[in-house]
Amino acid sequence: MSRELHAAPHVVQALGAIVGERGLLLGADMAGYEQGARYGQGQALCVVRPASVEEVQAVVRCCVAHGVPLLPQGANTGLVGASTPDASGAQVVLSTSRLRGLCDIDAANRSVTVDAGVTLQELNEKLEPHGLWFPIDLGADPTVGGMIAANTGGTRLIRYGDVRHNLLALQAVLPTPEAEVLELGRALRKDNTGPDLKQLFVGTSGAGAVITRATLEVHVRPQQSATALVVPTSDDAVLQLLQALERELGDYLSAFEGLSGHAMQAAIDHVPDLRNPFAPEPAPDFAILIELEAASSKAYTGLDLQEALNQFLQDQFEQTIENAVIGNGHELWHLRHSISEGARALGKPIAFDVSVPRSRIMAFCRAARAVVAREFPFLHVVDFGHVADGGVHFNVIWLSDAAQPYDAAVVQRLRDRIYAMVVQDYAGSYSAEHGVGPHNLAYYRRYTAPASRRLAQGLRRLTDPQQLCGTVDFGDHEAQ
């Protein structure tokens, strides 16, 4: 019997004494913490929900003293299994759901210091009365700690950057016998007093420390926005349109999202309150959702964003655009955000969150669709993505009514094929936004150079000597 399981009753009792009755979950009460958002079903030793940094420290000390693995978990919305326990029943899930008491807004500094368990929606609700927001736009509602661990991007990355670019300071508890609290950075935009150590915990999927608090840069809420859904004249015209938009209106460009015809149709067919914006014509093969935003009002600048966008589109007609819908922004964004729901309604999604240089994004999508059609003709592609930053959600659906039943071996061949194209043929990444977790760890080991893996693992050992925190082992293993 392993040391963890042998010590389990004593550890659970000790953890319960730390976090109290409300903070300890066992048995059926753990179900929501053991099931991944899309993949994975594990079994935890217990779930602890500390309500303060001091309780986090005490939990960490207890786990380290008994050699018990610890899994930090936010809202559990990740899609690579990094926040889902494995099947061993030995891991303690440390949920940050009760770390939510602090949300200290400094409006003049445009910053907020917030506990790790506060969700993105809650944060923006608190910022709204100050005319501010944290503009990470996602389909899910993650916690602040989870967004940092995954380095979340979203649809407005081209204007505001990802979480990494908006992180000013970080508090984290190290998984060491002393459970030291690290305070990294301050509410400063300029601080060159040494290495930016807080970045060691960004995008690491929770490995190496428990994030407990952060200070974020926040932004002025837009007073103007303009939105259009345009049909490009060709694949080549997509990037020509993007470059022209950046030249003429780049200071206001906040989104440039690509939607395939299959993606739009899946949403229209399966989300009841959606309509086809191109009706009575069918949805086109491909469309671009363009959004402009400005913090300033027309009264001060004289600029009407909708008029500016309309003029730009008129100038681009026949050159790069063959059709356009200039509509209600909420309605067009509802179409974009409903694609994932529509895809799930078609069958079992096989999701690829990839990125390539944006100069090659249309060529990649065209080539990847051709591979699926040629080698996996029984599968259905529903692709969409962040064209302006090179990100693609290349979703492949195993249709519910497919003649060939779902086959995990076929899915593995598809994953190997698409990821090889992304990395080897298009100089891209197999994980654009979702990070590294058990469900793509083999590709990390396959496509990351040994020297880089050794460095990543060495850094983790500095903060987590027993490698107890998180699910990702960045070690220099043989490629799989």
Image: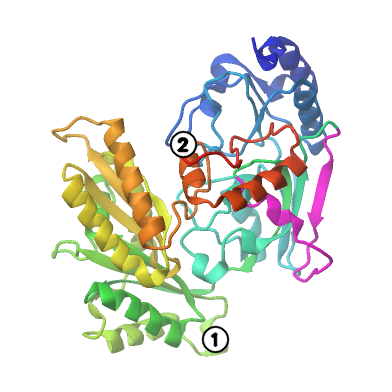
**Picture quarter with the N terminus:** top right
Report crowding for label 1: few under 14, some 14 to 19, many 20 or more residues within 10 A (C-alpha).
few
The residue that mark 1 highlights is 299
Q: Would you say 356 lies left or right of 343 here?
A: right
Is residue 296 depicted above or below 208 in this figure? below
Q: Nearer the N terminus, badge 1 or badge 2?
A: 2
Is residue 420 depicted above or below 95 in this figure? below
Q: Quadrant of residue 40?
A: top left
Q: How does the figure colour the protein chain or chains? A: rainbow
Q: Would you say 258 lies left or right of 464 here?
A: left
**Picture quarter with the C terminus:** top left
Kindly identify the amino acid type of the residue bearing the numbered disc 2.
Ala
- Give the numbered dot on residue 37: 2
Range covered by the magenta-colored residues: 178-204
Q: Quadrant of residue 305?
A: bottom left
Residue at the image position 38 percent from the left and 50 percent from the top:
419
The prevailing secondary structure element of the residues shown in magenta is loop
